[in-house]
Image (tube, rainbow, N blue to C red):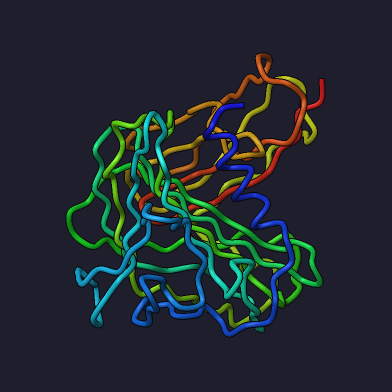
Amino acid sequence: MNKRILLYQFLLVLVAISAPLYAQIPNSGFEQWDQGEPIDWITSNEWFLNTVSQTASSHSGLSALKLQTLSMNEFLIPAIISAGPDGRGFPVSQRHEQLSFYYKFNKTTSTAYLYIAIGFKKNGETIGAEFITITEASDDFVALNIPITYLSNEVPDSAVLVMQVADQVSDTSASGSYAVIDDISFNVISDVDEDDVMLSDFNLAQNYPNPFNPGIKISWQSPVSGHQTLKVYDIIGNEVAILVDEYKPAGIYEVDFNASKLSSGVYLYQLQLDSKIITKKMTLIK
């Protein structure tokens, strides 16, 4: 099986399992470390393969988190970290509108990426989630907000947060690619009305019909001009189609998507404009 698929399956398992009780976003500024490990996070460090480390190149405070890929023989070792004392998450007591953080990203290959996934649960069931794959390098800290997509208006009781640096083709030439992450935080939704979850003027419509076979139209609205991407992923996070990847002025848009070459199943389609991201599900039945 493809190594990238195995990595995504590992991340999905982390998001799927129930989270134990713990404080919200533990050690969110990565100021507390013990024997080379950030306190209350679980890392992929093993033996001498330290893919996760402390760095003084911080956005604020004295230190930040560094995720760096390594190679061993013919294998690329990704850098992975997950929140909570056993990596299975932490409790929350409010609905959160978005996950915010600062990052820098240095790439040794064009296919290296930084992946971040956040999931919210209620009584063990997922009620909200979002993820982002960052492929553009940045030498300076970039502020990024990831809006959360909720499936219900319930208040979650736990959250799972996973981050990794890896390579799309697991090429050892990506060894040395790294990201620095600091100052992770949540923004709270003041009203749990489902209509308030999404950004009011930046909207991605639900595909109709759903389920579909094999062609549909996907529409969206952007209140500002900017570089926009609309991509389709399978349920384990593999990119299967790029529908839009270009600068567009503010307006309402629609694009055709033909899934005749894909197998039946659940897919995700994600719209991104700068730091604004919306992801929705669609089901293909042949």
Asked if residue 232 is positioned above or below residue 118 in the image, the reply reads above
Q: Residue at the location (33% across, 64% down)?
A: 53
Can you see residue 199?
no
The foreground one among 72 and 148 is 72
Q: Which residue appears at 54% of the width and 43% of the height?
A: 270
Specify whether residue 193 is in view. yes
Can you tell which quarter of the image residue 214 is in? top right
- Pick the residue in front: 201 or 259: 259
Percent x, y of residue 78: 42, 45
Vertical arrangement, residue 284 with respect to residue 268, above or below: above
169 shown above or below 78: above
Decide if residue 269 is on the left or right side of residue 55.
Answer: right
Please report the residue visible at 23 percent of the width from the left and 62 percent of the height from the top: 141
- Front residue of 152/113: it is 113
Q: Position of residue 280 (x, y in %)?
A: 64, 46
Give the residue furthest to the top. 261
